[in-house]
Image (cartoon, rainbow, N blue to C red):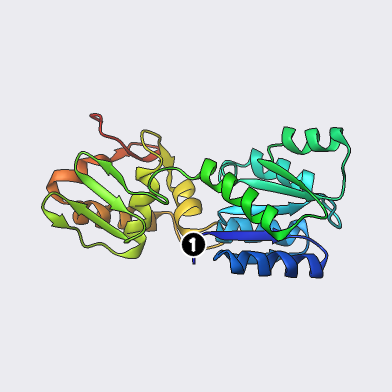
Amino acid sequence: MSGKTVLIVDDEAPIREMIAVALEMADYDYIEAEDAREAHALIVDKHPDLVLLDWMLPGTSGVELARRLKKEESTADIPIIMLTAKVEEDNKIQGLEVGADDYITKPFSPRELVARLKAVLRRATPPGVDTPIEVDGLTLDPVGHRVTTHDGALNMGPTEYRLLQFFMTHQERVYTRSQLLDQVWGGNVYVEERTVDVHIRRLRKALGDRYDHLIQTVRGTGYRFSTKAA
């Protein structure tokens, strides 16, 4: 598998099935939702890498869901491709104006869908998600799932790895404990905020004396990853 997960949001099961087959053949994982409410819950919980979002949904429309996702900080960076039978130019503009990254008009071929999806993911993927990222000799390799220094590999647990990956791909910005819980643990996972402190301590211990200073405590706010003096 590519390691990427795509959320398919469409109220028509045959369309979801057609898209699912195309994604499987292209080595993508996928999850499905048939309305905006179910989709939003999955997005908060699973953090898919991309959302294929139908314009016309029962209840809340796809456009309204896209607008909501782009307004919320925890979901604003998730790329969205709108799927619709609407061909009018103003509808396309409306979809793009609410934050959609691309727009595909039904009917579409599976090959076109996968090609557009790959193009959007390439634009949206920062270093450290698909390719290694290095800071002062500390290297995180997402494909090999390893963290190394000039002295060799570092041992850390899966949560500490996810924390470090998030920090290294979001440097020089302060995150509250609540934001870190949403981004690293998932929005529907109920754990106390002090759990973040425990894993920060473990991460610093794993990084050792040479790199633990990169994880900085911002008193009264939270934490940041920075190469600058605190």
Q: Is residue 89 left or right of residue 68?
A: right
Find residue 148 and report its image quarter. bottom left
Q: Is residue 109 left or right of residue 27?
A: right
Task: Give the residue drawn at x 82%, y 63%.
Answer: 11
Give percent across and percent down for residue 27.
54, 66
Looking at the picture, tell me which residue is in the foreground, 105 or 194.
105
Looking at the picture, tell me which residue is in the foreground, 173 or 146.
146
Give percent across and percent down for residue 150.
13, 49
Q: Residue beneath label 1, please?
A: 2
- Could you tell me which quadrant the C terminus lies in? top left
**Residue 112 against residue 156 in the figure, above or below:** above
Q: Amino acid at mark 1?
A: Ser
Label tally: 1
Residues packed near mark 1 inside 10 Å, few (<14), some (14 to 19) or many (20 plus): few
Task: Give the residue drawn at x 86%, y 55%.
Answer: 59
**Residue 132 against residue 23 in the figure, above or below:** above
Q: Is residue 92 left or right of residue 137?
A: right
Find residue 176 and report its image quarter. top left
Give percent across and percent down for residue 61.
82, 49
Residue lying at the far top of the rendered structure: 229
Badge 1 marks a residue whose secondary structure is loop
